[in-house]
Amino acid sequence: MANLKLTKIAKSYGGANVLNDIDLTIETGELIVFVGPSGCGKSTLLRMIAGLERITSGSLEIDDVVVNDVPPAQRGIAMVFQSYALYPHMTVRDNMAFALNIAKMPKAEINEAVNRAAEKLQLTEYLDRLPKALSGGQRQRVAIGRAIVRDPKVYLFDEPLSNLDAALRVATRIEIAQLKEAMPDSTMIYVTHDQVEAMTLASRIVVLANRGIAQVGTPLELYERPENEFVAQFIGSPAMNLIAGEITETGAQTVISLEDGGRAVSDVPTTEADLGLKVNIGVRPEDLMRTENDAIYTGKVAITEALGEVTLLYFEKGARKEALVAKLPGIQGITKGEVVAMTAPPDKVHVFHEGQSLLYR
């Protein structure tokens, strides 16, 4: 399989820049997931890797060979689209064998490749059916099987589960994870807007925003140590709470006096030069807990959502732009209109200045 290196990749349409200065190295055997808001360029970047979009500037290397001008069919890449793109008049077997037939491979080799892929994807009993006789999840597996039989250097997945209902998404996501385990040397790049897919499938996640890369890291790195406010709020649901304040004590632990009247202590280290610095603290809803004193936030509950395993509390906005959200374990019995004080452990309090985490200065 293959490694990829993207150096200063940029894409523009006319005078409109879509992506700028994309630097990324993908090692053999990784499953890299591109995530980001709609319109951030994740599918465009995937299509440039596939050769379906021209690279405006920069270089793309596959196994140390620059492939900017190499046609898609010669890059050793197979792409799985969200629309399945199956031929409705062909059986599953013929759909999976189509590219191999075009390449004029020997019949015996084609049959072996199709049967091997069908066994991996549990499609053997469906090989003689037409796509219309399959469920959405089975059709997507056929589309994946069509990629597998080609034995490509790199697999590209463009939101492959977006057309499936919730239950099928879960089942097919598990199947893709199992497929990756069965093909540990395969290099895969996966585009999705679904955080659960990204967090559960990825070796590393690439978060795209503002025409570039906001952060690259393992799922836990992005969740526990976001480099900026965008990643902090994009990764995790409900999103991380941000509260404005000012640094009033520095050292190994930092004390922040908050605009809402609360007080936060963070393990993010600061120096005397940071005294008076205007910052935002970030606290994930699940890291908040009730307290009797030294509250980060005290407010009136506007909405409660008791979900069984957790209870979500949405506080009244007041002068805030966004309502603070707390995610507490189990059934809490907290009612609308109740005033509740919340705090968080110092190691769970992030500190951001001008949108960037103070941890990464």
Image (spheres, rainbow, N blue to C red):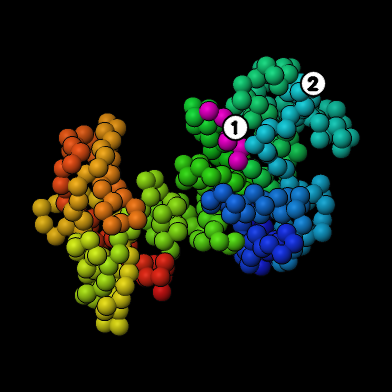
The secondary element bearing badge 2 is classed as loop
The residue type indicated by label 2 comes to His
Q: Is residue 8 left or right of residue 301?
A: right
Residue under label 2 = 89
Classify mark 1: residues with Cα within 10 Å, few (<14), some (14-19) or many (20+). some
Q: Is residue 266 magenta?
A: no
Residue under label 1 = 163
Residue at 70% from the left image edge and 42% from the top image edge: 79
Residue at 31% from the left image edge and 72% from the top image edge: 278
- Residue 264, position in %: x, y? 22, 63
- Residue 85, position in %: x, y? 73, 32
- Residue 249, position in %: x, y? 21, 75
Q: Is residue 325 left or right of residue 225?
A: left
Residue 56 vertical placement versus 327 (above, below): below
Residue 90 appears in the rendering: yes
Residue 252 vertical placement versus 29 (above, below): below
The secondary element bearing badge 1 is classed as loop
Q: Looking at the image, is mark 1 or mark 2 nearer the viewer? A: 1
Instruction: Give the quadrant of residue 54.
Output: bottom right
Classify mark 2: residues with Cα within 10 Å, few (<14), some (14-19) or many (20+). few
The residue type indicated by label 1 comes to Asn
Magenta region: 159-165
